[in-house]
Amino acid sequence: MNDLAAVRDYLTGLQDRICAAIEAADGGARFHEDLWTREEGGGGRTRVLREGAVFEQAGIGFSDVSGTRLPPSATASRPELAGASWRAVGVSLVFHPRNPYLPTTHANVRHFRASRDGQTVAWWFGGGFDLTPVYPVDEDIAHWHRTARALCEPFGGQARYEAHKRWCDDYFFLRHRGETRGVGGLFFDDLSEDFARDFGYLRAVGDGFLDAYLPIVARRKHTPFGERERAFQLYRRGRYVEFNLVWDRGTLFGLQSGGRTESILMSLPPLARWEYGYAAEAGSPEARLADYLRPRDWLAELASAR
């Protein structure tokens, strides 16, 4: 029970498998690896692929870090953790494609535990994956959510999918813009009911990511685009930056806990832009995106999308 070594082994293997799959899908670049250590405890390996044929930048990091005191952002809602030592292991990725018709994606799977006087006082699993299209394609969104629902089936089925889809919609919401970051997926945190079962769900989410994303890569990576689509992609990437720097708890925890800044901020796109008072032309493909940036029952609405 509570086999941290097994979790760590799974996560390092997951990073290896995803890197191999993305290199194969890209066909033009390979990941560069940085091994790093953290002064307070632990370290990790950050891998970044740049200027590929498909991915302008793809970053995926494994970390196993520890400390003797949690930052205020982590203990504000969990005062029982104040003063406890902690250890966190996880894999996190963000892929920024070159083609505006291929969505940006994020995934994260992680395990956390806190202890005091050599005794575990708390542990949990968290993670999920989400999709951020610029030019949404119903077929892709339906596939993404069907994959998410299918992997939830052994762990509560429809109820688990609906709960963690809702959590994803709520978490990846830009409150200052009044819109979701994308079309959602799954998100969960503080999962600590049964170690073996919860670890099984973490693995299902981690393994399910490639099942959800690679078919979309294959369908969209060669879609023709021009300067207009590229400009809109860079504009929408600005929203991605805003969420990660303003609202994302993982970014805040990493920076406040003395994490490696380069690894934490590898989620940001290599290029982005902002435009004051931008308004898409009515009836344009760019205007169409707005209808997708709100919580929706994708599986019911896109039941016929293939």
Image (spheres, rainbow, N blue to C red):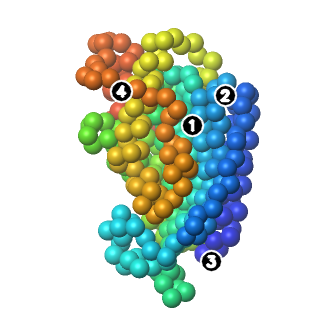
Q: Nearer the viewer, residue 237 or 14?
A: 237
Q: SS at mark 1?
A: strand
Report which quarter residue 300 is drawn in. top left
Pointer 3 local density, CA inside 10 Å: few below 14, some 14–19, many at least 20: few
Q: Tell me whether circle 3 and circle 1 mark residues in contact (CB < 8 Å).
A: no
> Mark 2 — residue?
52
Q: Position of residue 13 (x, y in %)?
A: 72, 55
Q: Amino acid at mark 4?
A: Trp
Q: Which SS class for mark 2?
A: loop
Sequence-first tag of 2 and 1 = 2
The amino acid on which the numbered mark 3 sits, given as a three-letter code, is Met
**For discs 3 and 1, the disc positioned in front in the rendered view:** 1
Tag 1 residue: 95
Reading the chain from its start, which is encountered first: label 3 or label 1?
3
Name the N-terminal-most of marks 1 and 4: 1
Q: Are marks 2 and 3 in contact (CB under 8 Å)?
A: no
Dot 4 or dot 3: first in sequence order is 3
Separation of residues labelled 4 and 2 (CA atoms): 24 Å
**Quarter holding residue 45:** bottom right
Amino acid type of the residue tagged 2 in the rendering? Gly
What residue does disc 3 label? Answer: 1
Name the residue located 65 percent from the left edge and 73 percent from the top edge: 3
For the C terminus, give its image quadrant: top right
Residue at x 54% of width, y 55% of height: 260
Mark 4 lies on residue: 274
At mark 4, the secondary structure is loop
2 or 3: mark nearer the eye: 2
